[in-house]
Amino acid sequence: MRHHTTAALVLTALTLTACSVAPSGSAPAASSSPRGKAADAKPLSSAALGNRLLTEEELGEGYVRKAERAQHNDDVTVIGCPALAQLGGDAATGQSLGFPNKAKAAFTYSGGSDSEVAEELYSDTANKLSDGVGRIFDAMASCPTYQVLSGSTAIDMTTQTSSAPKLGEEQWSQLLTYSAGGQRSIVKQTAIRTGDILVIVSGSPGLVDTHLSKALAKAEAAS
């Protein structure tokens, strides 16, 4: 499942790196919830966010946390989707994400299948989180098919918007189908904004659905 790992990480990085781009004026597409109340909240530090990530014990039996990936310098290029290419695909190396306050963890699950689930937490003002994530999900939805080149790896992508559970204040969700190295896989990616925290869970669709509410509850909990 090496191609599964590479593609999932590239797409997660591509999505989140785009959040650093200056606002383009487009509105978030997935929710009409008001954002004003938390607009001036002070973002949480990366250390505080790290304490709110799910652990292997909280995920359950069969989960093992993956080691952090080493820095790499592969160029990432988006072909066939100008909206995504404009949002910073060239910087998507897997280590350079848009929001400075962040924490992330990835896990493998061996309970009957070789699958993965990853969680990322980000903190910034509500408006910055909303605008950044809204732009990238809108851009991906505007290009149902495109290609991502990461170094020498070509990944053929299709994107489909999916319904997100009514959690938090704003929600986005999509199914990403990609083909790389002769393998075809589906990754679900769901983002929930609650106040000044953004929770993103991605991976096998069933695992995302299973752990999303748990991830959000811990992210919202007091340190």
Image (cartoon, rainbow, N blue to C red):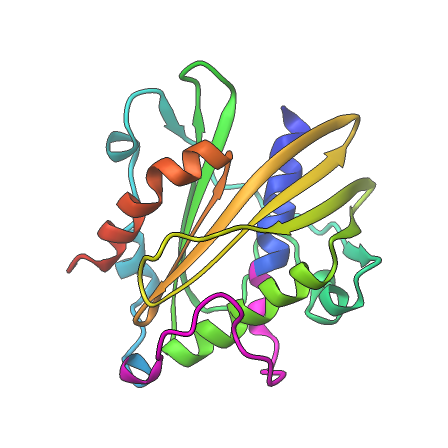
**Residue at 57%, 43% in the rendered image:** 70
Q: Is residue 75 left or right of residue 67?
A: right
Up-down relation of residue 133 to residue 223 (above or below): below
Q: Is residue 96 visible?
A: no
Horizontal and vertical percent position of residue 86: 74, 71
Nearest to the observer: residue 110 or residue 187: 187
Q: Indicate the quadrant where residue 17 lies.
A: bottom right
Answer above or below: position of 27 versus 156. Answer: below
Residue drawn at x 28%, y 27% as measured from the top left: 60
For image coordinates 37% across by 76% down, the residue present is 126
Q: Is residue 145 left or right of residue 15?
A: right
Q: Residue furthest top?
A: 112
Q: Nearer the viewer, residue 8 or 134?
A: 134
Q: Position of residue 43 (x, y in %)?
A: 32, 74
Position of 87 relative to 104 (above/below): below
Q: Nearer the viewer, residue 62 or 186?
A: 186
Asked whether residue 30 is drawn in magenta, I would say yes
Quadrant of the frame with the N terminus: top right
Q: Quadrant of the C terminus?
A: bottom left
Q: Percent from the top left, x then y, of residue 61? A: 29, 21
User: Which of 145 and 44 lies nearest the eye of the viewer?
Assistant: 145
Q: Is residue 136 left or right of residue 89?
A: left
Among all residues in the image, which is located at the extreme left?
Answer: 222
Q: Which residues are magenta?
A: 16-37
Looking at the image, how many numbered discs can be counted on the residues? 0
Does residue 217 appear anywhere in the picture?
A: yes
Magenta span: predominant SS is loop
Q: Residue at x 44, y 72 (%)?
A: 129
- Can residue 8 be found in the magenta stretch? no
